[in-house]
Image: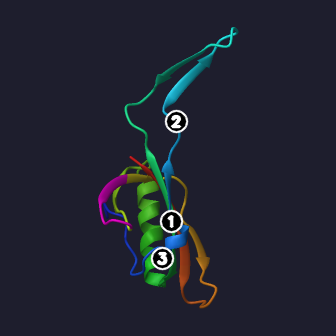
Amino acid sequence: MATSFPIPGVFPQENEFQESLAGSPAIRTQFDNGYILSRTMQTSVKKVWQFTYRGITNTEKEAMADFQEDVLLEGDRAFGMTNPRDDSEMFVRFLDILRFSLHAADNTKWDVTVSFIEA
C-alpha cells in the first residue's frame, strides 16, 4: 500500500493552484453585553491546497483513484505529498474526493482536481 500520493507526469495548472488557511483556530463566545471571549483551540493554523492536473493518462488516473480508496478505507489516514510549487514534503489528508473529468481536447486523457488539508 502506497504511503505517498502518486504524482502524475504533468505539472498542476499554475492559474488554478490555490493555497489558503483552513480557518481560524479561535473559539469565540459572545456575551450579552457585547464582549467577546476568544481563545485558540489548537497551536497552529492548518493550510489547505487545491489544484488541478490536466491531461493525465488513464494509468495515472487509476493510480490516484486506487490510492484515494486505500486511504479512505483506512479511516482517512494522513499521507505524504510533494508540494508541486516548491517540492517540499508535507503530510496531508484529503479535504474532498478527487474530481476526475475527461480532458476536453482529448477523450483519452483526464483532468483531476485535488484538495488537501495539512495533517
**Residues rendered magenta in the picture:** 85-91
Is residue 108 located in the magenta-colored stretch of the structure?
no
Residue 73 lies, in percent from the top left, at 45, 54
Q: Residue at x 62, y 13 (%)?
A: 35
* Numbered mark located on residue 49 in the image: none
Its colouring scheme is: rainbow
Residue 99 lies, in percent from the top left, at 58, 67
Circle nearer the N terminus (2, 1)? 1
Q: Which residue is mark 1?
A: 17
* Numbered mark located on residue 61 in the image: 3
Q: Residues within 10 Å of mark 2 (few under 14, many from 20)?
A: few
Q: Residue at x 38, y 46 (%)?
A: 119
Q: Secondary structure at mark 2?
A: loop
Q: Give the label, 3 or 2, closer to the camera.
A: 2
Q: How many marks?
A: 3
Q: Give the label, 1 or 3, closer to the camera.
A: 1
Residue 49 lies, in percent from the top left, at 47, 57
Left or right: 11 with respect to 32? left
Q: Residues within 10 Å of mark 3 (few under 14, many from 20)?
A: many
Q: Is residue 64 above or below residue 28?
A: below
Q: Is residue 22 above or below residue 7?
A: above
Q: Residue at x 33, y 65 (%)?
A: 86
Nearest the camera: 92 or 35?
35
Q: Is residue 44 above or below residue 29?
A: below
Q: Is residue 117 above or below residue 9?
A: above
Q: Which residue is mark 2?
A: 24
Q: Quadrant of the N terminus?
A: bottom left
